Each structure stands twice: as structure tokens, then as C-alpha cells.
């Protein structure tokens, strides 16, 4: 199955910024929704942000609202996650995935079961 390719992770101090990138690694069907998720060992993968490509609407979990911003560069088929004012609790492996939906309501729900074509992830580590 075609996968996304994430990059841009790293180790930073609290308060710093990072920008993650997600490039389409071969998903050939039209994409209406892209999501960013994160996971720490021993915990479930959680939705962080998504973008409904039809109209550009974006959605965020409460934990990152106001600090993270998701955007898309259509020309390069790339989705970004700009992460500002990073906190130690943001430490996780970050993944992007394609939403298997035509609707904004499902895109905004950020349920892992509604997304496919997961990438391998990029690690973000934030130290205090």
C-alpha cells in the first residue's frame, strides 16, 4: 500500500519550533483529507491535526490548538505541520496519513480508523 513519507523531526528545547513535512509516497487516488497523528510507547496513537483539502479547513486537538498549524502545498503534493512553542509533552513519533473520507466531519474527527497510507513516522523529542 502506498505510504506517506514524513520528515523534519528532531530534538529541541521547550519553546522551540519544528516544521514536519509529509510527501505523497505514491497514493494515487484523489485525496480529500490529510491528518497528522502522534504516538508515544505504550499509548494509543492520537490525532493532532487534519486538513480538509476541498476547502482548506483545518482541525486540531485541544492539546495543540493555538500552537500547531497544518497546511498544504498542492504544487508539491506536500502537507506540513508547523509546531511552535513545543512542550515536553509533545515528545512522540509523528505520523501523517490519508483520510478515507469525502466529508469534513470525518476528517475533523481524527480517528485513526478513518485514515490509511500511514508513513513510517518522524521522531520529535522536546526537552525541558
Image (cartoon, rainbow, N blue to C red):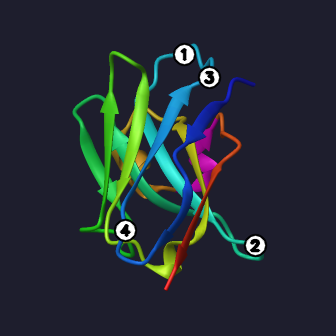
Pointer 3 or 4: first along the chain:
4
Q: Secondary structure at mark 1?
A: loop
Indicate left or right for 114 with 34 as reference. Answer: right
Relative to residue 111, is residue 90 depicted above or below?
A: below
Residue at the disc numbered 3: 25
Q: Front-most of 43 and 94?
A: 94
Q: Secondary structure at mark 2?
A: loop
- Tell me where the magenta segment starts and ends, as one range: 111-116
**Residue drawn at (24%, 43%) of the image:** 57
Mark 1 vs 4: CB contact within 8 A: no
Residue at the disc numbered 2: 41
Residue at the disc numbered 1: 29
Q: Front-most of 121 and 51?
A: 121
Residue 33 in the image: state x and y as whole percent. Answer: 42, 36
**Label 4, label 2: how many angstroms apart (C-alpha)?**
23 Å
**Residue drawn at (61%, 67%) of the image:** 92
**Label 2, label 3: how many angstroms apart (C-alpha)?**
25 Å
Pointer 1 or 4: first along the chain:
4
Residue 118 in the image: state x and y as whole percent. Answer: 66, 40
Residue 75 in the image: state x and y as whole percent. Answer: 33, 15
**Residue drawn at (75%, 72%) of the image:** 41
Amino acid at each position: 500500500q502506498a505510504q506517506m513519507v514524513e520528515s523534519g523531526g528532531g530534538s529541541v528545547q521547550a519553546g522551540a519550533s519544528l516544521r514536519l513535512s509529509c510527501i505523497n509516497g505514491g497514493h494515487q487516488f484523489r485525496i480529500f483529507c490529510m491528518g497528522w497523528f502522534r504516538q508515544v510507547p505504550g499509548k494509543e496513537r492520537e490525532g493532532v491535526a487534519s486538513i480538509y483539502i476541498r476547502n482548506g479547513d483545518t482541525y486540531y486537538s485541544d492539546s495543540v490548538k493555538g500552537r500547531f498549524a497544518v497546511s498544504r502545498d498542492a504544487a508539491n503534493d506536500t502537507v506540513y505541520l508547523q509546531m511552535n512553542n513545543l512542550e515536553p509533552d509533545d515528545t512522540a513519533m509523528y505520523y501523517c496519513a490519508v483520510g478515507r473520507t469525502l466529508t469534513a466531519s470525518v476528517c475533523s474527527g481524527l480517528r485513526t480508523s478513518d485514515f490509511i497510507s500511514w508513513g513510517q513516522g518522524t521522531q520529535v523529542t522536546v526537552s525541558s
